[in-house]
Image: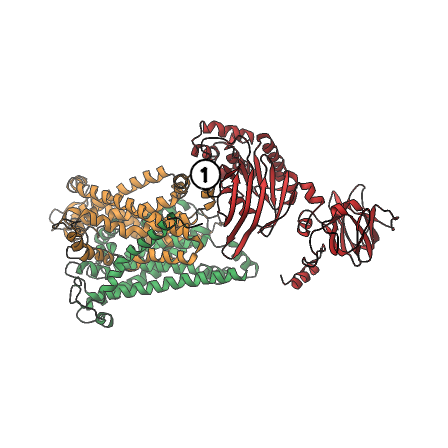
Chain colours: A orange, B green, C red
Amino acid sequence: MAFAAFSTSTAPVAADTARKSSPVALLLLLPGILYLVLFFLTPLVSLLLTSFKAPAEFGDIGQFDYAFRWENYVEVITTYWPHIIRSFGYALTATFFALIISYPLAYFIGVKARRWPLLQSLALVLVVAPFFISFLLRTLAWKQIFSDESFLVTSLKAVSLLAPDAHVTGTAFSVIFGLTYNFIPFMTLPLYTTLERLDVRYLEAGSDLYASPFEVFRKVTIPLSMPGIVAGTLLTFIPAAGDYINASREFLGGTGTQMIGNVIEANFLVLQNFPSGAALSIILMSAILVLVSIYVKKSGTEELL
Amino acid sequence: MKLSFGKWVLPVYSALALLILMIPIGYTFVYSFNDSLKSNIVWRGFTFDKWLNVCNVQNGAVCEAFGNSIFIAVVATVVATTLGTMIAIAIVRYRFKFRSQLSLFLFLPMATPEVVLGAGLAAQFLSVGVPKDMLTIILAHTMFCISFVVVAVKARVAGLDPALEEAGRDLYGSALQVFLRITFPLLLPGILAAALLSFALSFDDFIITNFNSGAVTTFPKYIWISAARGIPAEANVLASAVFILALVVVVSVQVSGTARAKRLAKMN
Amino acid sequence: MATGTFAESGADLELVGIHKRFPGFTAIDDLNLTIPAGSFFALLGPSGCGKTTTLRLVAGLETPTAGRILLGGNDVTNQKSFQRPVNTVFQSYALFPHMTVLENVAFGLRRRKMAAPLDKAHEVLRLVELDHLASRRPQQLSGGQQQRVALARAIVNRPALLLLDEPLGALDLKLRRQMQLELKTIQEDVGLTFLHVTHDQEEAMTMADTIAVMNKGRIEQMGAPQELYELPRTSFVANFLGQSNLFTGPVMGTTSAGISVDIAGQKVVVPIDRAHRTSGEITIGVRPEKLTLHSSKPARDAGINVMGPGRVIDVSFSGVSTQYLVDVPGAGKLVVFAQNMTFGSDVREGDKVWVSWTIDHGFGLDDDPAEAPRFSPDLDTHTIAAQHLVEGA
């Protein structure tokens, strides 16, 4: 319902309703746009400027002067490149698994369950329900479920599926698991929207033209659901790359699973090393922009943006 | 024709997937009944206490944080929904230069990782010298909610048949009357949906809040801080209460919508 | 299985004892049908009569609740649609929007791993005169062009049987007429068996070698178009194919010419070999174009039937002919089509006229008048509405 917001990025271009040219438009736009310029654009500029700052000559920790210290970037990359690689690795893995897990679910709700709209609605509510419980609490729940003293882990150890001294929490597995879980709704909803609109007559035509069910899926269903796949993967990958809750030590992460988000947070809020934090943020944002534009160009869905 | 095995794979898989999605919710809900002291990890016993005395003195910080979150979400929602709806109407209905560039610009806050948004705002507030407190949180939340509101309302505005407003003017309505009596009521479901979305996003936001809150604690921030030493069951209670309320609202909207659609279909 | 080979020519289609039940209603009730190889067969009927369901059963998109489907002697009832050597031209065309026209046409060939799929696709596109648009997307084509691509996509596979699901519905009149001729030509040239489903009786009569008229899940009558038109078996067929003037009355006796029926006090004769029932109350009819209008009572003649006098209550000019509505007391309102051989019409509204027709043109229906509702060609909404109320529809 409310989360149909995710769906609009896959909505077909609405028919051009009559458009007039009028000063009213400016009046309507100005407040909102001004607000965004002030609190979105300017902060990004601020971030960029901060990333070049140098430590203040005579200041304490946390005090910086404007400069053009591009060395900040070099330092940051040399110190934190494992985190950068790791973040993108985790995010890609989580996105991949989220796609594999969500597609059949979205297909079932959007295509197979079309005859029962009530079932469709309720299933969607269930998909979206995790949003109603705090992100942190649901991640925490998994931490408890995967903790060494939990029922699950002790049972697995008892039947020797897990080594006696193994941990589930604090590993790459648990972080990726957490990321995947938390972003499944983000993946499922756009997929659902596209699949819901899928005309089954195309599938029938494919079958009529000698395509086996698997071939129909590969050659007809997947290409036609591409907009949803692209939207879903973007909506999952981008936040996942910058996430740091899952990877933090208090949740599902450990010392070896720190992501770039953790590092940025640490630099900003703990170390007060704002230029480093800013530089990392800029690197993260640029990397995402580059990856996304290549991805969208390759999948041919530029109209999405 | 008998049902082949293949027919059952998808439904069973979906049921399983949905079940697993629900596990943390179930866990949180169950543990809200745990007779715990400070930390809520080990199950000690079943009790209704926490539900009945949520805002007790011992763990009062939870309620305060919860209250802060609600307040912030309400303010941010009101502002973001107003500004966002105005933008949405302008973008869909009016022609002006840079329209497509504007759409892209509005899309950016949704596409930017929260870490970057939070860090950026923190950097800016720092440069300008604004201390981090309730105000900065509200400003931050409003910002990222606007984009979502625009996207949600835009779809609704685009689906609005301009012939309806033309009919209104044909029947002697002034521009203001047409807006108040025709446009706005028809847009209302979309606006409400956008407001609900905005509220949910603001209430549950952690990352951006963490960067810009200073000493003020919101509900998610409280959980983050107490994660190290143990989250009291009262937090579970509050979260579960919110969940149940949200669930009831969404389900009743869906059911009434479907029931109404069925009745309309029957009449034809 | 049809992989990798073309059917040499069309194949016989046999439907044996087909039943199809959906939750809540029966779409097809004991259908038995044989379509000989190489023929153009039309399944004609109103919406909801079961013709589209029949098509889908043959295509393999649905499975029958009971009965068998045989193609060229092989039982294909349990074969899925991708296993059957049958192709469909869908009503909505269902051209894959994410592929070019060429790839659409080549799709079936590729799935069956046939050699040189693109060459064959080009060949068929040349047949439908669309080869110059081969690299376009379906969305960029007009309705008529899309329809031809859909056709090309199906026939390139040389199926044993080609199914057409009201493929001309979305086209305007001129284009439809043109496509009707093209389809017929292609069918004869390539030698495939076509099963064409439509609700347009003119289309069916123009294109098909054989027509089966379906109503409420059953076939009412089957035969060559002319046969169905000139000798309908039931009132449904008489009224669905073209228009008919129907009368009900008791059989008075038999003469050498035929049986004589009393219609509102007038004697009407129907040849015995054109009457399904020969005693009791029967329904007889005659086509409007077979009727002649007279301003004065025509001379007695053993070879013609005369009805009248009646009053002309409506005159409608429709280009080729003029349609008259004549109210004959006791017999109801008769529809008369008169070809416009001269300019202007001699008969005006309100004139007193007699109607006559050759005895050989009349027909007697198989319906039992006691069961069927009285069928008079009521052309005013008042009567139709009243009739609905009476029937409790």
Q: Nearer the viewer, residue A34 or B107?
A: B107
Q: Nearer the viewer, residue C291 or A80?
A: C291
- SS class, disc 1: helix
In the image, A305: left or right of B45?
Answer: right
* C134 over B125 or under it: above or below: above
Number of residues whose C-alpha sits closer than 10 Å to that of mark 1, classed few (under 14), some (14–19) or many (20 or more): many
Residue B15 in the image, given as x and y percentages of width and height: 33, 54
Q: Nearer the viewer, residue B252 or A295?
A: B252
In the image, B26: left or right of B38?
Answer: right
Residue located at (82% from left, 51% from top): C348
The reply to whether residue B147 is visible in this rendering is no
Residue B16 in the image, given as x and y percentages of width and height: 31, 54
Picture mark count: 1
Residue located at (80% from left, 42% from top): C343
In the image, A88: left or right of B92?
Answer: left
The quadrant of the picture occupied by the N terminus of chain C is top left
Residue on which disc 1 sits: C83
* C71 over C315 or under it: above or below: above
Residue A256 in the image, given as x and y percentages of width and height: 15, 46
Residue A25 in the image, given as x and y percentages of width and height: 44, 52
The reply to whether residue A136 is visible in this rendering is yes
Q: Nearer the viewer, residue A13 or C33?
A: C33
Read off the chain for label 1: C
The quadrant of the picture occupied by the C terminus of chain C is bottom right
Give the amino acid type for the residue marked by disc 1 in the picture. Answer: Gln
Q: Quadrant of residue C99?
A: top left
